[in-house]
Image: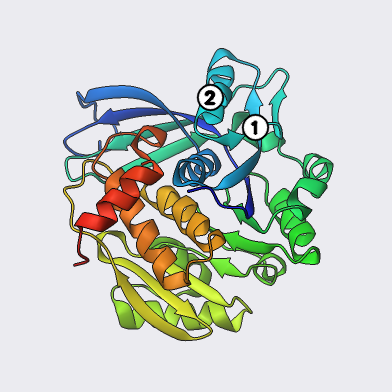
Amino acid sequence: MSSSQKLVVLGSINADHILTLEHFPHPGQTLTGHNYQVAFGGKGANQAVAAGRSGADISFIACLGEDAIGAQIKQQLAQDRVDTHAIQTVAQQSTGVALIFVNAVAENCIGICAGANACLSTDYVQQHAELIRSAQALLLQLETPLESIIAAAKIAQQANVKVILNPAPARELPEELLRLVDIITPNETEALSLTGVIVHDEKDAAEAAYVLHSKGIKTVVITMGSRGVWLSENGQGQLVAGFKVKAVDTIAAGDTFNGAFVTALLEGKTALDAARFGNAAAAIAVTRSGGQPSVPWREEIDAFLNTQTAL
């Protein structure tokens, strides 16, 4: 189902180099891994793909390196129903890279080289201001320069475009940006960075959401892994339970949730139904390896929801 509402995603593109290990190495230790693969990733690209495959009308503002893998990624994005005309190839830059270890219990640790992602400047954002203004929603993450993220959010807010921020990777953020955000989607680690609250359970999630509401953010969605998400709207919170699946790796689970969640909102679903849709998409993604290769298509999500019951 295609949404008539337009989504713009602004963010990062990486080539993910993924290696599965029994456990993460200690300093000075060499481990033999298996299942090495190179997959297309980056939080921005993952979320754009999740939205495209979920059925959104989505344009992506991003930067690629002048290399073979950058060209391959752009071609793949188009196949995933992402409008790529606002993706710039930056001369004499490499496409961003992520080096990812996955352990035996599907946890991951990641090191990133920004590459061309660092070239997503405020000037480049301004070049695509009209694209942002033409959308109904702007989805942002934190793997590109912060000043450009703020610039994009300001353009969106002035045009009454809904601003959704996935504040990942975790970091402190200026109030200037938080004041521009309508919906924020941190995980437990990111919620801690933004609020100082350690999220162990629903009570903690409600406390963290309250802190974020106090900064002017109307809707707070705290992703809590297999438990699901804490959805809080104007101070009223509830757990939207996750789905029970056997996880293989969790690399793009949060990104898949974000892309699918925003797609569902743009189709007119309530935040509760959109969160359940996002949970279903993420549940499918964790049963597969890799970043973008794990992201499900709309038909798969709808079929999953027809057969699953929440925990």
User: Which residue is denoted by mark 2 in the rendering?
Assistant: 73
- Distance from disc 2 to disc 1, alpha carbons, whole Å, reads 10 Å
From this view, report whether residue 91 is shown above or below residue 25.
above
- Judge left or right: residue 64 versus residue 274: right
- Look at 33% across and 49% down and name the residue there: 301
Q: Nearer the viewer, residue 75 or 13?
A: 75
From this view, report whether residue 203 is shown above or below residue 200.
below
Residue type marked 2: Ile
From this view, report whether residue 310 is shown above or below residue 130.
below
Residue 170 in view: no
Q: Secondary structure at mark 1?
A: loop
- Look at 21% across and 25% down and name the residue there: 33
Residue type marked 1: Thr
- Judge left or right: residue 151 versus residue 310: right
Q: Position of residue 90 (x, y in %)?
A: 71, 24
Q: Position of residue 251 (x, y in %)?
A: 35, 42
Find out whether the residues at labels 2 and 1 contact each other: C-beta distance under 8 Å: no
Q: Secondary structure at mark 2?
A: helix
User: Which residue is denoted by mark 1 in the rendering?
Assistant: 84
- Look at 23% across and 42% down and name the residue there: 287
Q: Position of residue 48 (x, y in %)?
A: 54, 42
- Judge left or right: residue 32 versus residue 91: left
Q: Residues within 10 Å of mark 1 (few under 14, many from 20)?
A: some
From this view, report whether residue 10 is shown above or below residue 158.
above
Q: Which mark is residue 197?
A: none
